[in-house]
Amino acid sequence: MNQERLMQVLLAPQISEKATFVADKHEQVIFRVASDATKPEVKGAVELLFKVSVKSVQIANVKGKHKKFGRRMGRRKNWKKAYVCLQPGQEINFVDGGGV
């Protein structure tokens, strides 16, 4: 895989109550990823950027919400998120700037 492509796959970490619950219980981290990203690309990108070993990756497509803009109905974009399961003993700390 191209290293430039791997740098563009991860968009942002998903920080929420559900994400912290999943991180504590299942040793997983949730990322917002590019809409055309694949599981091997996400795995390679996380291992490259954070220097951790990844056990598995699950990807979910999130449908955009229907919102009202004045009198008109609009729709937000669809996006993709990845649940990255880390090997036992590995963790990513976003407070310290990533890494172990």
Image (tube, helix red, strand yellow):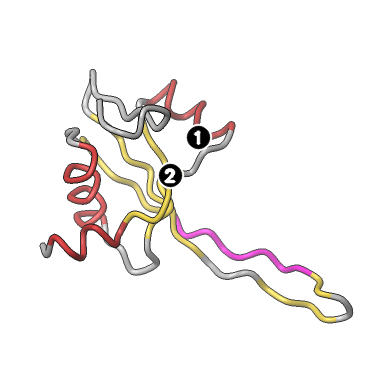
Instruction: Give the camera-side residue of 55 and 10.
Output: 10
- Chain part drawn in magenta: 60-67
Q: Amino acid at mark 1?
A: Ala
Circle 2 is placed at which residue position? Answer: 13
How packed mark 1 is, by other alpha carbons closer than 10 Å (few <14, some 14-19, many 20 or more), is: some
The percent position of residue 40, horizontal first and vertical second, equals 19, 54
Disc 1 + disc 2, Cβ < 8 Å: yes
Residue 60: give x, y in percent of width and height.
Answer: 43, 54
Tell me: 61 left or right of 53: right
| SS assignment at label 2 | strand
The residue indicated by pointer 1 is: 19
Q: Amino acid at mark 2?
A: Pro
Query: Measured along the vertical axis of the image, is residue 39 above or below residue 95?
Result: below
| Number of numbered discs on residues | 2
Label 2: how many Cα within 10 Å (few below 14, some 14–19, many 20+): some
- Asked if the magenta segment contains residue 62, the reply would be yes
Q: Position of residue 1 (x, y in %)?
A: 10, 62
